[in-house]
Amino acid sequence: MMLAMEEDSHKEACEHATNLKSWIARGGFPPLVRVTADDERYFLATDELAKVFCLAACDIAITRGNEPSSPELQ
């Protein structure tokens, strides 16, 4: 999903986001999330934080995937 979002493949990101939200809703675990600090250290997010991050990212991907095409998103 994140790669598709980075590549502006909004429909693909939306599909991945929908699947991820469904997986989490059924009790599935979120993907690992690493947070990088300015000094290049990274921290592994807790499952709770990873879940919140993933659901927020999914909402953004779904919103973008359902928007009509616009120059800003292409």
Image: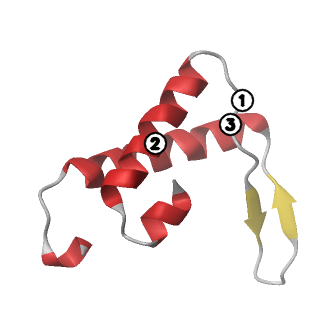
Q: Pointer 2: what residue?
A: 17
Mark 3 and mark 2 lie on one chain; the one further toward the N terminus is 2
The residue lying furthest to the bottom in this view is 39
The quarter of the picture where residue 9 lies is bottom left
Q: Nearer the viewer, residue 46 or 28?
A: 28
* Cα distance between the residues tagged 3 and 2: 12 Å
Tell me what residue is drawn at x 68 percent, y 36 percent: 30
**For the residue marked with disc 3, what is the amino acid?**
Pro
- Give the class, few, some or many, for how many residues have Cα within 10 Å of label 1's Cα (few <14, many ≥20): some
Vertical arrangement, residue 61 with respect to residue 15, above or below: below
Image location (x, y in percent) of residue 17: 45, 42
Q: Nearer the viewer, residue 38 or 65?
A: 65
**For the residue marked with disc 1, what is the amino acid?**
Phe
Tell me what residue is drawn at x 85 percent, y 60 percent: 43
Tell me what residue is drawn at x 59 percent, y 26 percent: 24
Look at the numbered discs 1 and 3 and tell me whether their residues touch, using CB distance below 8 Å: yes
Residue 53 visible (yes or no): yes
Mark 2 and mark 1 lie on one chain; the one further toward the N terminus is 2
